[in-house]
Image (cartoon, rainbow, N blue to C red):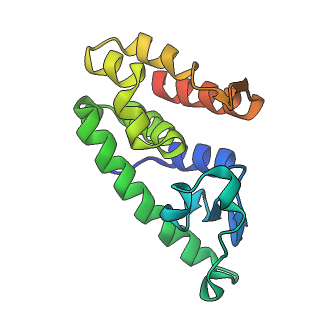
Amino acid sequence: MKVSDKCLKILVHHEGKRNKPYRCPALLFTIGVGHLMYPEQAKLPMAERMNFQIRPEDDRFYSDEEVNDILQDDLKRFVTGVLRLCPNTANNQSHLDALTSFAFNVGLGNLQRSQVRMKYNRGDFEGAADELLTWNKAGGKVLKGLTNRRNDERALFLS
């Protein structure tokens, strides 16, 4: 299975799309549509992340085709993970799309441990949709961008 164009639009809208590497708010080198360039950098304490340098061969402009290829590779991994963690999403495109967008943002490990997944797998789809809205904080603070994203994911989930 693949995500729909609706899911792609939500991802690009909320993640943004960049053709040059940048540091995300967590100080991690990122490219394209939210693609973490160096997973080992994420294991460093926040205070040490600024000391991590981009590899010279990666510090360049990426074509739209390269960015789209990276996104498609990332999506394959996330769709596979969502289907494994929430098997019933194979029967509902809107659920697959919304949970893939959610996992793309928070990670498959957080989806695995979440009330979103637990409620979804119990068949409490309304509860799972509502639970998405609780994932709108970073550093303990409610962020408008995350609130907007979760509202979009919930609407997609219920569509």
Say left or right for 18 vs 122: right
Say left or right for 8 vs 94: right
Horizontal and vertical percent position of residue 78? 38, 49
111 or 98: which is nearer to us?
111
Most extreme residue toward the right is 144
- Residue at horizontal 55%, vertical 68%? 37
- Residue at horizontal 58%, vertical 20%? 133
Number of numbered discs visible in the structure rendering: 0
- Position of residue 89 relative to residue 60, above or below, is above
| Quadrant hosting residue 109 | top left
Horizontal and vertical percent position of residue 68? 54, 68
Residue 16: tell me if it is visible: no
- Position of residue 11 relative to residue 59, above or below, is above
Horizontal and vertical percent position of residue 46? 66, 51
| Quadrant hosting residue 155 | top right
- Residue at horizontal 64%, vertical 80%? 63
Residue 25: tell me if it is visible: yes
